[in-house]
Amino acid sequence: AEITTESLASFKEDVLKKYPPKVARKRSKQFLLNEFQGEDAPLIEANVRTIPGIITMRGCTYAGCKGVILGPTRDIVNITHGPIGCGFYSWLTRRNQTRPDTETSENFIPYAFSTDMNENDIVFGGEKKLKAAIREAYALFKPKAMAIFATCPVGLIGDDVNAVARDMKQELNDQGIDINIFAFSCEGYKGVSQSAGHHIANNQIFTHVVGTSDTVVEGKYRINMLGEYNIGGDAFVIEDLMHRCGITINATFSGNSTYDDFARAHTADLNCIMCHRSINYVAEMMEIKYGIPWIKVNFIGVESTIKSMRKIAEYFGDQELKDKVEQVIAEEMPAVDAALKDIKPRTEGKTAMLFVGGSRAHHYQDLFREMGMTTLAAGYEFAHRDDYEGRKVIPSIKVDADSRNIEELDVHPDPELFKPRKSAEELKALDECGFEFKDYHGMMPDMKPESLVIDDLNQYEADELVKKFRPDVFCAGIKEKFSIQKMGIPMKQLHSYDSGGPYAGFAGAINFYQEIDRLVNTKVWGYMKAPWQKKPELVASYAWN
Ligand code: CFN
Ligand code: HCA
């Protein structure tokens, strides 16, 4: 169909017609034509249960906790308490890259640790097996920390992972071993999606690890990079940019991260949040407890990268830093301009659809915009309303500035070393200074009016979207990849980046431009039909020969 306001608007109607009335009513609230006008954001229902029977794109709570937040950490032994599939399918599939900082530093990421529960454990309980696994893993690897993750059957049979973690920490500590062991009740069914898993991971990391180390990483401008998971090496590009600007990264959550990163996170001057959806909870808690302000950054897209670098410089306020940032930007831009000049004549005017996770379906629109491409439809799998609409429109989730009582908190035995980074008054002033520290634009205000915004897209709707509008590229995950390609549409995975990346920063943007150019201009999609499917008489001639 031709892409017009009318055809996009009527799409919703057509799709919903196929559902039973009750399902249609529910789905219709998660499905809208974007007409974002400042404060009058249209309401979208998000973070609600998927209707059983619908083939959702979503993953589970365990995936969000173990796979996403803790998975990229190098030196914590992450033990999955569950059937082997849970551990196996969350093992390195996310393409989070690692680079140990010394030859001797630990890296357990190449291992999948699992209790491999079977029928016996389900019937008689699996706690003993879990304890044995912890003893065995300690004997083999001597890690400084272990994390236990509950899967669906664990919750159903009632194994208490938290009690096991407590007991085993005690047992090993009693032997004079310095180890931290903590558990996550992140059973897959616990929430409606990965999102609940993020929250559980944030809470436990904050409770058990953040603030437990005295190490201070020296530097003039010291930040934590939150919500950047180093997929395809993105974090390496960002680290390089920060390094060249003279900015020190004190901790990352959690791309290529270490236990010590988390433990000393409370000593940074500023928290920069890349993926708000997955890590806002830790940032919020660090602000309340340690007085560390947080700001949103986005290193996907050249414009966003520049904006983010300037925002960090402006926070610190030093002219020296501002100059350095401008210098780094100036060094990077010629290559970006050259790449755009090359590819844009071939990408301008093309169309994209993005249905990914909880932040990328928004962030990657910037890259497409830079290439002159239009996003026709987009949505998250599991983000919340604030990610769609922009934080500003939901004041209830904003920390009430007056409730910050950081001065009264006994933060650390050495108050000189660990005094709150900012006082409650200073934080309040930052909130109110209008410098866009906290505010960010959600997906909807950044998208063209009259584009489709669909939450928790499912397979039927994805098929219909592609059949009707035939975008030049469709972006989603591995489950969508082949059904889309079979319809003759190029498909780019924005989770794992297929085998590509990095796409962050300037170097990453250039990579992305070039890959998308190749993808949307290749002729291969014209060969979807075999010659004899187009010309049946060929069958006869082949048979004859
Ligand atoms: S790396 Fe992140 S950027 S953490 Fe999150 S919301 Fe997932 S694993 Mo897949 S690619 Fe995706 Fe985001 Fe944040 Fe990744 S868009 S779904 S849970 N996600
Ligand atoms: C997850 C991880 C995932 C899955 C990606 C995909 C990832 O949700 O458990 O569906 O292709 O990025 O690896 O989001």
Image (tube, rainbow, N blue to C red):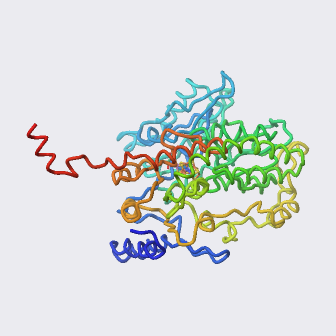
Vertical position of residue 245 compared to residue 271: above or below: above
Quadrant assignment, res 260:
top right
Quadrant assignment, res 104:
top right
Vertical position of residue 133 compared to residue 539: above or below: above
Give the left or right position of residue 40, taking residue 402 as reference. Answer: left
Residue 187, x across and y down, in percent: 49, 51
* Quadrant containing the C terminus in the rendered view: top left
Vertical position of residue 28 compared to residue 387: above or below: below
Give the left or right position of residue 13, taking residue 505 as reference. Answer: left
* Residue drawn 72% across the image and 42% down it: 332
Quadrant assignment, res 254:
top right
Q: Is residue 177 visible?
A: yes
Residue 42, x across and y down, in percent: 58, 75
Work out whether residue 421 or residue 116 is closer to the camera in this orientation and state it. 421
Work out whether residue 539 or residue 148 is closer to the camera in this orientation and state it. 539
* Residue drawn 62% across the image and 65% down it: 446
Residue 525, x across and y down, in percent: 37, 49
Residue 61, x across and y down, in percent: 51, 52
Work out whether residue 65 or residue 123 is closer to the camera in this orientation and state it. 65
* Quadrant containing the N terminus in the rendered view: bottom left
Q: Is residue 199 visible?
A: no
* Residue drawn 62% across the image and 29% down it: 143
